[in-house]
């Protein structure tokens, strides 16, 4: 699987996940209403979940429903942020599209094909994981409960732990319209929240993969321009090529700003709540050993998922920083000190903005890189 150069696949996926809306007219208004309703479901579902846990008793509820509480808080913040920043994210996506479409050389197309394939493989793997977890946690138990209701005399319901105890007032509810309404509502809430989370990971993987592609192409262009200047000196051709590089660099800076605006706050949320979630599930696993096998398995899966998600996000952020440093190194390798002052002035401006690597953070906090992951692991240990 590889990405399309016009980013139509990215736009479609982000629209499904409720991150952007590029449609106009009546359909665009309908889609905006649907996305707003999904946001309301995500927010209210998070509130209902946490209220139910509080009414049940935090000490008894955390091992059973901690995964819902933390997941709900994170996805609620993500969904709200994406809704508020939807116009800026849309503009950033189209800026990236215009820059990608400029690369018409065969080697640039091959590079885009290779890097986009990696991004889309990551998205497919993560989406498949979400679908499998949701299917076995909600769909399969619901079908099994329906089977018990029809073909057996069982009056107690069957489901994996979901936070309805505080609302229904019992851990073992009987089948009723209220029970099934709550179960279906929580299922819809979790699915909508999963879409918001997938929207975050799609933005992260695709933006980083495509921006790394652009930075690698610009590094090659800088090196080629340096060789061109060595051969011909200051000519109209070298000046024109330098102006093109400067324009591309300015567009890249705008993309970097858009990337931070789109992903900075959600990444900060991960960096703050990620360690709390990992600690919570680690403690719960120790408490539940030899007590409740089902809850033990659920918390082990949740722990692995959180560690994997945090590690992968940090690795992607690290790759972005390393690629931006390589772009700066390509600037330093050309013989800029031998060039006329007018050209050096232009190059110095690019070097000034490139000396600090492109990174995902929120106003200087929560830098997404491997240093963050090591800090999280050392804090937990």
Image: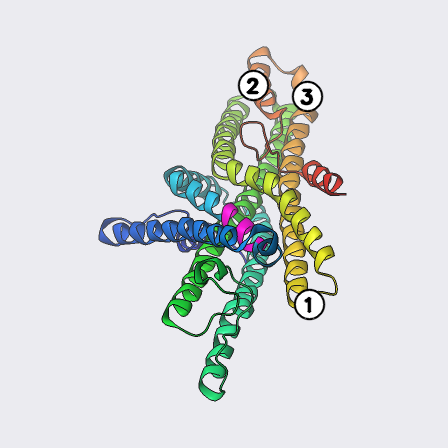
Which of discs 2 and 3 lies nearer the camera? The answer is 2
Cα distance in 3D space between marks 3 and 1: 66 Å
Q: In this view, does 372 lie to the left or right of 247?
A: right
Q: How many marks?
A: 3
Determine the residue located farthest toward the top in the rendered image.
341
Identify the residue under disc 3: 335
Which of discs 3 and 1 lies nearer the camera? The answer is 1
- Magenta stretch bounds: 66-74
Residue located 65% across and 28% down the image: 328
Residue 70 in magenta stretch:
yes
Q: In this view, does 91 lie to the left or right of 126?
A: left
Which of discs 2 and 1 lies nearer the camera? The answer is 1
Residue located 57% across and 46% down the image: 209
Q: Work out whether residue 6 can be spotted.
A: no
Q: Which mark is residue 349?
A: 2
Residue 153 in magenta stretch:
no
Residue located 63% across and 44% down the image: 276
Identify the residue under disc 1: 293
Q: Is residue 184 above or below residue 143?
A: above
Q: Work out whether residue 347 can be spotted.
A: yes
| Majority SS type along the magenta span | helix
Mark 2 crowdedness (10 Å alpha carbons): few <14, some 14-19, many ≥20: few
Q: Position of residue 142 (x, y in %)?
A: 48, 74
| Helix, strand or loop under label 2 | helix
Q: In this view, does 355 lie above or below 65?
A: above
Cα distance in 3D space between marks 2 and 3: 16 Å
Q: Where is residue 277 in the image (x, y as percent from the top left)?
A: 63, 47
Q: In this view, does 321 lie to the left or right of 57?
A: right
Cα distance in 3D space between marks 2 and 1: 61 Å
């Amino acid at each position: 699987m590889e990405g399309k150069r016009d980013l139509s696949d990215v736009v479609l996926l982000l629209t499904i996940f409720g991150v952007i809306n590029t449609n106009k007219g009546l359909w665009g208004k309908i889609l905006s209403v649907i996305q707003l309703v999904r946001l309301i479901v995500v927010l209210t579902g998070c509130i209902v979940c946490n209220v139910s846990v509080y009414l049940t008793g935090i000490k008894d509820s955390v091992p059973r429903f901690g995964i819902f509480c933390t997941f709900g808080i994170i996805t609620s913040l993500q969904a709200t942020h994406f809704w508020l920043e939807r116009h800026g994210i849309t503009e950033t996506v189209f800026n990236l599209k215009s820059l990608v479409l400029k690369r018409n050389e065969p080697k640039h197309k091959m590079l885009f094909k290779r890097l986009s394939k990696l991004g889309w493989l990551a998205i497919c793997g993560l989406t498949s994981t979400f679908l499998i977890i949701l299917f076995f946690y909600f769909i399969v138990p619901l079908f099994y409960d329906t089977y018990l209701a029809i073909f057996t005399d069982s009056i107690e319901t069957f489901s994996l732990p979901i936070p309805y105890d505080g609302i229904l007032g019992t851990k073992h509810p009987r089948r009723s319209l209220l029970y099934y309404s709550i179960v279906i509502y929580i299922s819809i809430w979790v699915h909508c929240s999963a879409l918001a989370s997938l929207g975050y990971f799609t933005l992260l993987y695709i933006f980083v993969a495509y921006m790394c592609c652009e930075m690698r192409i610009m590094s090659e262009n800088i090196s080629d321009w340096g060789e061109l200047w060595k051969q011909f000196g200051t000519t109209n051709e070298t000046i024109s090529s330098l102006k093109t590089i400067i324009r591309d660099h300015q567009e890249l800076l705008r993309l970097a700003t858009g990337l931070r605006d789109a992903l900075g706050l959600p990444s900060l949320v991960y960096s703050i709540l990620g360690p709390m979630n990992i600690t919570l599930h680690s403690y719960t696993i120790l408490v539940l050993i030899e007590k409740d096998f089902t809850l033990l398995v659920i918390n082990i899966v949740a722990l692995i998922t959180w560690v994997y998600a945090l590690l992968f996000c940090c690795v992607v952020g690290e790759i972005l920083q390393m690629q931006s440093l390589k772009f700066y190194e390509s600037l330093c390798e050309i013989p800029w000190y031998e060039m006329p002052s007018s050209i050096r002035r232009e190059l110095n401006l690019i070097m000034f903005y490139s000396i600090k690597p492109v990174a995902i953070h929120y106003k200087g906090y929560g830098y997404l890189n491997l240093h963050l992951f090591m800090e999280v692991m050392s804090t937990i240990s």
